Image (cartoon, helix red, strand yellow):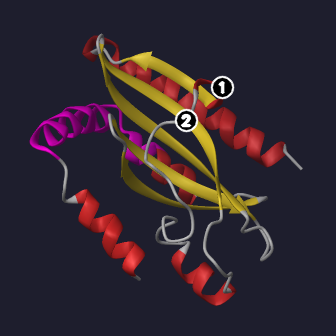
Amino acid sequence: MARRRDRHSSDKQFSQQTRVSATQTGVVLDAINAWGYLEDVAAQRHERIHCFGPKTVYGSDSVGVVVWYKQRGPYHYQHIGVLGVWALQVADGVRIVLGTKSLAFNAPVFNPESYFHHIKRDYSFYYDDDGSPPPESQQRYSAIYDESARLAIRAALQTALRRWTKTMESER
């Protein structure tokens, strides 16, 4: 339980500059409907995976909205996948990134009852994540945000998310 308190107390230690940056990038995520798209992904009935979320994550220079997923079955807890849309403050403005990353289980013991209760609400109790976007090799879409291209970016995100869903359903 101390782990949870530590995570929340560090959230409160954001500097004023980080809050302003997080607000600006958060507005961009709202403009492209990142939360809504990922909420739709999590709500779908997936044949091979359990999908949970969404939730907001904060990196050192980014804000993201993520869903997390794992293979179906009680023995697939060693790794989970995180699918998300991140907004990063860069020199050119705000970069939008859609990508996935894998997180390894890091709790000292696995208690299935506790795990399945908590994993539906939040993954950070069992998996460490710094909130940063995935490396370029795991990015499925990336663009500099431009207000005039907002609808095109939204359409591209929807297309990339549909491709991800089809890929997850076809993998064995």
Task: Report which residue position mark 1 lands on.
Answer: 137
Q: Which mark is residue 101?
A: none
Residue at x-position 53% and y-position 72%: 120
Residue 65 vs 155, above or below: the answer is below
Determine whether label 1 and label 2 are within 8 Å by CB: yes
The total number of labels drawn is: 2
* Residue 5, picture quadrant: bottom left
Q: Secondary structure at mark 1?
A: helix
In percent of width and height, residue 112 lies at 68, 85
Identify the residue at horizontal 48%, vertical 36% (top origin). 133
Name the residue rendered at 61%, 80% in the picture.
115
The residue to which callout 2 is attached is: 134
Q: Is residue 28 left or right of residue 24?
A: right
Left/right placement of residue 14 relative to residue 140 reads left
Please report the residue visible at 81 percent of the width from the left and 74 percent of the height from the top. 75
Q: Residue furthest left?
A: 16
x, y (%) of residue 122? Answer: 47, 68
Magenta span includes 31: yes
Q: Residues within 10 Å of mark 2 (few under 14, many from 20)?
A: many
Per the rendered image, the range of residues in magenta is 15-37
Label 1 sits on what residue type? Ser
Queried whether the magenta region covers residue 35, the answer comes back as yes
